[in-house]
Image (cartoon, rainbow, N blue to C red):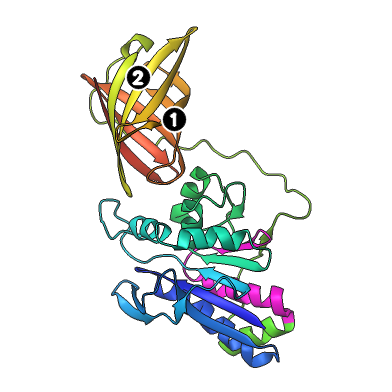
């Protein structure tokens, strides 16, 4: 028996969920193996609102990890405006803060479970802290965010990393589901499903196998910071001491105290959460140039990320960005 549970949550993308559902259901017509395909939830809700227009989808029951097989986590649908409380990043973050977080962790640690995702579904897993060192893909707008969580983003339509299989953008749900059918039931069943839908799986599924390709050097990334205000020259002495720092991210605001010190001629620092003084992180690789200061910092709230900072001195403040992949957050600091 093959159990397939497609997880629904508030704001889920309709096509992310429906396309794999149809593929898996069609596969059951071509095999004697008993296949069940269900829409399940992270909690006991009977309905969730999905898609751009909040179409209601019925949830059969709560995700049941005793049913060994395939779990599919879709992405979210909505605005990409970082200031919109109903943006895709916010919906994904809210989904990661439900009971789904613990369920994902348990499923990935279960050798009898195959965890799959479409589009932003892999970002939900990344926000749950389970993708560090794993090869995955998501929608192109979230690829750098994957990297910031410690995952290894792969630019492919479908990525097979063993017990985790991920699909790229929305329509890749078709390709991922057909590939899962091929992997679990064989290529002849998958071929019949393709014939039924008059759709052929696109692209080569990436696996960490075979001869490693020789790649050309990647062009340096253009800086995300475009300074419009008049900046001042910087020196280490300008930074020493404490700063009140506000970082406005698409998934919440961080209020921190940064302390810069000169230790044996090397500029270092710490960041302390103003609401949780026990939450202290290091400022790593602090570099000061004539006009800017850069560093990296690992944070756990509002999600686990590795942020890359670039700030400039503007009058008596530091202003700039904290970048987590594609998403750039505004940074403002004033001396305490």
- The answer to whether the residue labelled 1 contacts the one labelled 2, judged by CB atoms less than 8 Å apart, is no
Magenta part of the protein: which range?
159-187
Query: Looking at the image, which is closer to me, 279 or 49?
Result: 279
Residue drawn at (30%, 61%) of the image: 79
Percent across and percent down for residue 109 are 63, 58
- Taking the view exactly as shown, the residue that stands out farthest to the left is 315
Which numbered tag is attached to residue 291?
2
Q: Residues within 10 Å of mark 1 (few under 14, many from 20)?
A: some
Q: Is residue 177 above or below residue 231?
A: below
Specify whether residue 248 is in view.
Answer: yes
Is 317 in the magenta? no
Which comes before the other along the chain, label 1 or label 2?
1
Q: Is residue 120 above or below residue 265?
A: below
Q: Secondary structure at mark 2?
A: loop
Real-space CA distance between mark 1 and mark 2, rounded to the nearest whole angstrom: 25 Å
How many numbered badges does the structure rendering display?
2
* Quadrant assignment, res 320: top left
Residue drawn at (40%, 39%) of the image: 323
* Quadrant assignment, res 210: bottom right
Q: Is residue 125 above or below residue 147?
A: below
Tag 1 residue:
281
Query: Looking at the image, which is closer to me, 146 or 303?
Result: 303
Q: Residues within 10 Å of mark 2 (few under 14, many from 20)?
A: few
């Amino acid at each position: 028996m093959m159990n397939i549970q497609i997880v629904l949550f508030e704001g889920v993308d309709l096509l992310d969920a429906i396309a794999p559902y149809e593929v898996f259901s069609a596969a059951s017509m071509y095999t004697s193996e008993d296949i069940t395909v269900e829409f399940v939830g992270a909690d006991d809700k009977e309905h969730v609102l999905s898609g751009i227009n909040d179409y209601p989808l019925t949830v059969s029951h709560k995700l049941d990890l005793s049913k060994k097989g395939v779990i599919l986590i879709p992405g979210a649908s909505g605005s990409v405006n970082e200031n919109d409380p109903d943006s895709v990043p916010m919906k994904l973050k809210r989904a990661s803060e439900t009971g789904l977080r613990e369920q994902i962790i348990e499923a990935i640690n279960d050798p009898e479970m195959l965890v799959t995702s479409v589009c932003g579904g892999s970002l939900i897993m990344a926000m749950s802290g389970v993708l560090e060192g794993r090869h995955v893909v998501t929608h192109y707008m979230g690829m750098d965010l994957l990297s910031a969580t410690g995952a290894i983003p792969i630019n492919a339509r479908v990525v097979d990393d063993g017990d985790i299989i991920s699909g790229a953008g929305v329509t890749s749900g078709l390709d991922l589901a057909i590939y899962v059918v091929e992997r679990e039931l064989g290529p002849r069943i998958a071929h019949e499903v393709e014939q039924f839908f008059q759709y052929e799986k696109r692209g080569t599924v990436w696996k960490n196998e075979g001869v490693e390709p020789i790649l050309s050097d990647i062009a340096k990334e253009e800086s995300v910071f475009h300074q419009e205000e008049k900046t001042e020259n910087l020196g280490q002495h300008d930074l020493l001491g404490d700063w009140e720092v506000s970082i406005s991210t698409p998934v919440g605001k961080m209020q921190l105290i940064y302390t810069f010190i000169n230790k044996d001629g090397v500029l270092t620092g710490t960041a302390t959460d103003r609401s949780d003084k026990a939450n202290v992180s290091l400022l790593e690789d602090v570099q000061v140039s004539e006009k800017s200061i850069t560093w990296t910092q690992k944070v756990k709230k509002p999600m686990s990320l590795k942020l890359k900072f670039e700030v400039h001195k503007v009058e008596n403040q530091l202003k700039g960005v904290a970048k987590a992949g594609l998403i750039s957050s505004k940074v403002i600091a004033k001396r305490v």
